Amino acid sequence: MPTLTRRSLLAGSTVAVLAASAPGAEPVAAAAPPAGQQAPGIYRYRIGAFELTALYDGIWYRPITDKFIRNAPFAEVERALDAAFMPHDKLATPFTTLVVNTGAKIVLIDTGTGGQIAPTAGALRDNLAAAGIAPEAVDLIIISHFHPDHINGIKDKDNALVFPNAEIMVPAPEWSYWMDDANMNAASADEKLTFRNQRRIFSDIAKRVTRFEQGKVVTPGIETLPAPGHTPGHTVFAIHSGDRSLMVLSDTAQHPAVFARHPDWQATFDVDGDAAVTTRKRLFDRAAADRMLVTGYHFPFPSCGHLVKTASGYEHVPAEWQPAL
Ligand SMILES: [Zn+2]
């Protein structure tokens, strides 16, 4: 086998440059045209007897300003973004929903953007189809909290239900907070948009929505845990089957390169920043100590891995792709 040295690589690239710039040289036609589009965003894994399918809905590059983190100077935030190879004016915000086939039910945890938030998101239905899961087959939708990127996929742009046979379960304190008109009237103009969107999604289907108390097992093997801060009723899920467990962290932290490494940071989108930090540290400490597999809604796809405690925060270690289930 010939040895590839830096010198031979450089020599090779010089030849390529010379060939490309030679007078009269025609561009070489590729043997096959490029695909020009991404492959489906699906990743399967198992927790005990449960089969899980992570489904990518897409990504939003959320515009940010120097006010993005309430309790850190922007220069520090810029250093964290640099360390994560991210621009300074946008936060990479991927969306990954999770289907759990418990054997008894097909459960969907959070529903994606419904194609109503960013042109680069809204792929959930295509990825569901690529995974061989019909929307009609979903028995139960469980919602972590009421921000639009988690609930908008319940309906399409014309307000029709995307998953017509699914029971919808939502955290009771989340419903109490956001569906309260006094809270809406007291909110800022921006927040009022969030309140109005929740009414668009839920008002005419309120009868089919079940409110659960946090701490309850909502279906065998899926336990709900209170995780207040990001929103008042924000909920995390512990999925148990056999001797295996997974913690579904929802929005306990957004991109881990920013918020796991800097767990004290309070983002402008957290309703109660102090509570969000307390919740994040409590759950991350538990996941790190127990070496639990975790998934986060805004972690890079397929978003499952582990959290390791470091001197100043936590590091997310992505799981290896598993070729066999
Ligand atoms: Zn979110």
Image (spheres, rainbow, N blue to C red):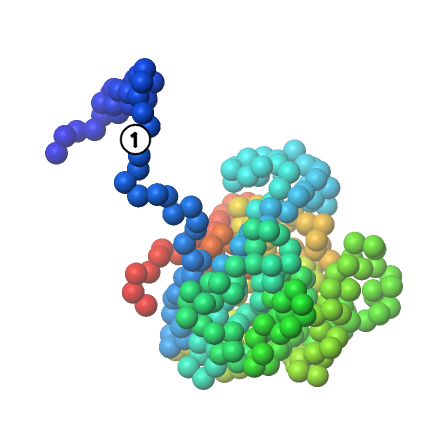
Q: Residue at x 83, y 55 (%)?
A: 188
Q: Residue 301 in the image: x percent, y percent?
A: 47, 55
Q: Is residue 171 above or below residue 248?
A: below
> Does residue 116 appear left or right of residue 109 in this picture?
right
Q: Is residue 308 visible?
A: no
Q: Residue 161 in the image: x percent, y percent?
A: 62, 74
In this view, the residue in front, 127 or 246, is 127
- Extreme residue in the left direction: 1
Kindly indicate the quadrant of the structure image that contains residue 324: bottom left
In this view, the residue in front, 319 or 163, is 163
Kindly state the secondary structure of the residue where label 1 is placed: loop
Q: Quadrant of the N terminus?
A: top left
Q: Residue at x 41, y 70 (%)?
A: 132
Q: Which residue is mark 1?
A: 28
In this view, the residue in front, 241 or 54, is 54
Q: Quadrant of the C terminus?
A: bottom left
Q: Residue 267 in the image: x percent, y percent?
A: 68, 49
Q: Residues within 10 Å of mark 1 (few under 14, many from 20)?
A: few
> Does residue 150 appear left or right of residue 20 in this picture?
right
Q: Residue at x 58, y 67 (%)?
A: 111
